[in-house]
Amino acid sequence: MPALTSEFKSGYVAIVGEPNVGKSTLLNALLGEKLSIVTAKPQTTRQRVLGIFNDERAQIVFLDTPGLIKPKYLLHAKMLEFADWALEDADLILIMTEVGKQGTLPSEVEERVLKRHADKILFAVINKVDAVYKPHVLPVMDKLIRRNQFREVIPISALKRQNLDDLLNTIIRYLPNGNPLYPTDILSEHPERFFVSEFIREKIFERFSQEVPYSTAVEIREFKERETGGAYILADIVVERPTQKAILIGKHGQSLKEVGSAAREEIERFLQRKVFLELFVKVRENWRDKEQSLRNLGYHMGKQ
């Protein structure tokens, strides 16, 4: 990386919005690396995921957050805590929406963000503009501009990487001058085992429907280097009911094998080394509503 200048910028940028508007896709696109898991199902992200963008002009510490929802379980309340934590840290907040979902009017939960953080620099980011007729985007932008709550209103397609350079340049323009907040050669502060558990959870979301993926969590019990090379990883997939365990395992264990195979490929890509992955399924009744279970599974404030 080139030498830093006196005009170097640095700061925290939180990405918030309702489930499935493309927050994790945006983070991955901006970094050029898959850090946040992405599926077609809403509420895939459960915790704050920190990703670091570096170039000769700035260091931007992006904070991907769980989708903003009204809590139904204690887990949901914890997810909102992670989002609030990111918002408190942020120098700038990107509130993401999309034309085809809710148009221009923020939801009740998004209104809460606007009211509590009105003193922060707020951008409205309209995602998925590649999927709509272009003239439909302009009225949405106009309504958001008229709200007088956003410094900038920027249309993008995170999936197609459209207008991301403009978004980055605009973010950098608003960030304060300052030295890097993290070493410039890292992408995240999270340990490897955090990403391993997330990739396993992603494959469960991709392969199962209805309540099963939302009732699962992943706990890494062992993560060690093998003398013969590569890494050995032992993980428990936690569910709430025996019926969910049976579905995850499948006939003759086939479903669990498919999850493990797909997850191993993703983990090897990320770790850049061979992986031996063992998965087991455990039942912990109503873990989503138990404080101690959530703490044991890593759903608490603090570094992962």
Image (tube, grey):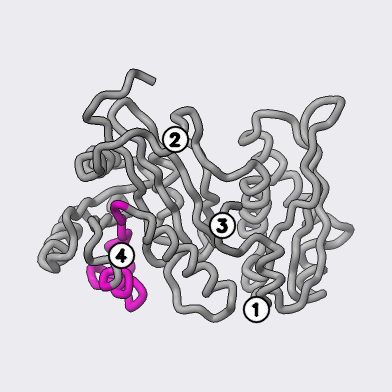
Task: Name the residue type under label 3.
Answer: Gly
Q: Quadrant of the N terminus?
A: top left
- Circle 4 is placed at which residue position? 100
Q: Quadrant of residue 123?
A: bottom left
Q: Earlier in the sequence, mark 1 or mark 3?
A: 1
At x 38%, y 34%, the residue is 180
At x 27%, y 56%, the residue is 126
**Disc sitting over residue 289 in the figure:** 1
Q: Earlier in the sequence, mark 4 or mark 2?
A: 2
Q: In this orientation, which residue lies closer to the viewer: 295 or 44?
A: 295
Name the side, left or right, on which 195 lies relative to 242. left
Q: In this orientation, which residue lies closer to the viewer: 222 or 147?
A: 222
Is label 3 in a helix, a strand or a loop? loop
* Between marks 2 and 3 in the image, the one whose residue lies nearer the viewer: 3
Q: Position of residue 204 (x, y in %)?
A: 67, 58
Mark 4 is surrounded, within 10 Å at the Cα level, by few (under 14), some (14 to 19) or many (20 or more) other residues, namely: some
Task: Name the residue type under label 1.
Answer: Asp
The reply to whether dot 4 and dot 1 touch (C-beta < 8 Å) is no
* Between marks 4 and 1 in the image, the one whose residue lies nearer the viewer: 1
- Circle 2 is placed at which residue position? 32
At x 42%, y 58%, the residue is 86
Q: Earlier in the sequence, mark 4 or mark 3?
A: 4
Task: State the CA–CA distance, disc 4 to disc 3.
Answer: 36 Å
Q: Quadrant of residue 70?
A: bottom left
Task: State the CA–CA distance, disc 4 to disc 1.
Answer: 33 Å
Is label 1 in a helix, a strand or a loop? helix
- Circle 3 is placed at which residue position? 302
Magenta residues span 91-115
Q: In this orientation, which residue lies closer to the viewer: 85 or 143?
A: 85
Name the side, left or right, on which 257 lies relative to 24. right
Q: Position of residue 188 (x, y in %)?
A: 51, 40
